[in-house]
Image: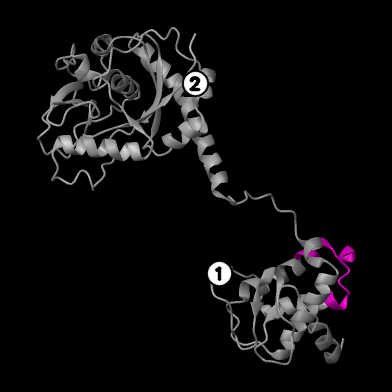
């Protein structure tokens, strides 16, 4: 093929780039949209990959294939591999080419035109394993996150049963996973995804006093003392001013992190405990979340944590359990762990940076 023929072929418009002309700065159209220019101009953001042959060697391979009419069917596997490799070399070397003669520009484009005509790229490219496609939109990401959380919660269901059985709390009538799953609507899951370590709790229909007795009777690892709650008969104090717990199982997803990460805008060391509690309530409400507001739910979370050897709220934090119902100057009901489960009160006027609340979202479950 003489130079005039090559130039004629090179001037054929290509969908990936402009026509080739006599202008020295005209881009060279390469596979996969990569281009180089005779003066070494290039596009930003291209990350070159390691190459196994020089551009000159690659050009020889491509020209040989062109001279043979790109008869792919007659090529051996090794020849096909070499031609494919030659294509990759130009893409990988695009950033490294500092000078490129005009004749080389024409020769490259001539081969590209021929290669497209014979569909050599499609024929030579080996079948690669299908790669996961990037998420196209927000909805796809949300579906993936919900599925992951659902799988996590499913694994927590039997863990909750084991935790209750460890301290001999009856699991009779405990909702099955199938029943719980019905209540895990997209709205519930989306709220739970805002939590630190969303944790499924199955609160049994037993009194809070019986839960404490069970913890004392079956001490966990590291438990040195019995729990002696403060004014535990005060239902308004330990049930956030609500009535007695109904005689039925309650299901919820709660913030189960060992220590909840504080919000520095709230826990700034300059606010009273009652102020911080109210601000944390407001923050969670803005996210559509409730908070743990009773000793029964907190003790159930603690039972699960103790069974796994990781009690929540160790020395560096405590959880307020009556933040919504407590008056501004009322004592705060608190739960924590320090060699035992602690259920105590806290002065609303103290400046205590250990104060936390734990978010919660209820799960509606049909029960027999």
> Does residue 171 appear in this view?
yes
Residue 298: horizontal and vertical position, in percent? 29, 23
Q: How is the image coloured?
A: one colour
Badge 2 is on which residue?
180
Determine the residue located farthest toward the front in the rendered image.
Answer: 327
The part of the chain drawn in magenta is: 65-81
Q: Which residue is painted at 32% across and 21% down in the image? A: 297
Residue annotated with mark 1: 47
Instruction: Tell me if I can see residue 260 in this picture.
Output: no
Distance from disc 2 to disc 1, alpha carbons, whole Å, reads 49 Å
- Indicate whether residue 76 is drawn in magenta: yes
From the viewer's perspective, tell me whether residue 107 is left or right of residue 160. right
Q: Residue at x 38, y 37 (%)?
A: 195
Label 2, secondary structure: give it. helix
Q: Position of residue 172 (x, y in %)?
A: 43, 7
* Residue 168 against residue 328 in the figure, above or below: above
> At which x and y percent is residue 122?
79, 62
Q: Is residue 83 magenta?
A: no
Q: Secondary structure at mark 1?
A: loop
Contact, mark 2 vs mark 1 (Cβ under 8 Å): no
Q: Examine the image and state in which quarter residue 19 appears.
A: bottom right
Q: How many marks?
A: 2
Say left or right for 284 vs 28.
left
Examine the rendered structure and indicate whether residue 238 appears above or below residue 31.
above
Structural crowding at the residue carrying mark 2, measured as other residues with C-alpha within 10 Å and reported as few (<14), some (14–19) or many (≥20): many
Relative to 192, does residue 2 appear above or below in the rendering?
A: below
């Amino acid at each position: 093929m003489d130079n005039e023929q090559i130039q004629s072929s090179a001037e054929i418009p290509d969908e990936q780039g402009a026509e080739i002309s006599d202008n020295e700065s005209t881009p060279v159209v390469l596979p996969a949209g990569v281009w180089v220019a005779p003066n070494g101009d290039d596009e930003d953001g291209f990350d070159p990959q390691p190459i196994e042959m020089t551009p000159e060697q690659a050009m020889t391979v491509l020209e040989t294939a062109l001279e043979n009419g790109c008869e792919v069917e007659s090529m051996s596997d090794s020849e096909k591999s070499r031609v494919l490799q030659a294509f990759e070399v130009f893409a990988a070397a695009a950033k490294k080419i500092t000078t490129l003669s005009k004749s080389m520009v024409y020769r490259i484009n001539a081969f590209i035109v021929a290669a497209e005509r014979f569909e050599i790229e499609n024929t030579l490219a080996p079948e690669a394993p299908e790669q996961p496609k990037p998420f196209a939109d927000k909805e796809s990401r949300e579906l993936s996150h919900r599925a992951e959380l659902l799988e996590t919660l499913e694994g927590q269901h039997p863990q909750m049963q084991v935790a209750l059985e460890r301290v001999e709390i009856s699991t009779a009538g405990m909702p099955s996973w199938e029943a719980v799953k019905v209540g895990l609507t997209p709205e519930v899951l989306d709220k739970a995804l805002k939590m630190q370590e969303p944790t499924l709790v199955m609160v049994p229909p037993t009194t809070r006093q019986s839960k404490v007795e069970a913890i004392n009777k079956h001490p966990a690892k590291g438990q040195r003392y019995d729990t002696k709650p403060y004014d535990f008969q005060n239902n308004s104090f330990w049930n956030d001013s609500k009535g007695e717990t109904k005689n039925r199982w309650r299901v919820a997803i709660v913030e189960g992190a060992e220590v909840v990460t504080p919000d520095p805008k709230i826990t700034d060391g300059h606010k009273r405990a009652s102020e911080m509690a109210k601000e944390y309530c407001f923050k969670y409400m803005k996210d559509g979340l409730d908070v743990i507001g009773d000793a029964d739910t907190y003790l159930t979370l603690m039972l699960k944590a103790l069974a796994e050897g990781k009690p929540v709220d160790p020395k560096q934090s405590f959880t307020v359990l009556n933040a919504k119902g407590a008056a501004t100057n009322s004592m705060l009901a608190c739960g924590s762990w320090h060699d035992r489960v602690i259920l105590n009160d806290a002065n609303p006027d103290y400046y205590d940076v250990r104060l936390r609340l734990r978010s919660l979202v209820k799960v509606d479950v049909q029960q027999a």
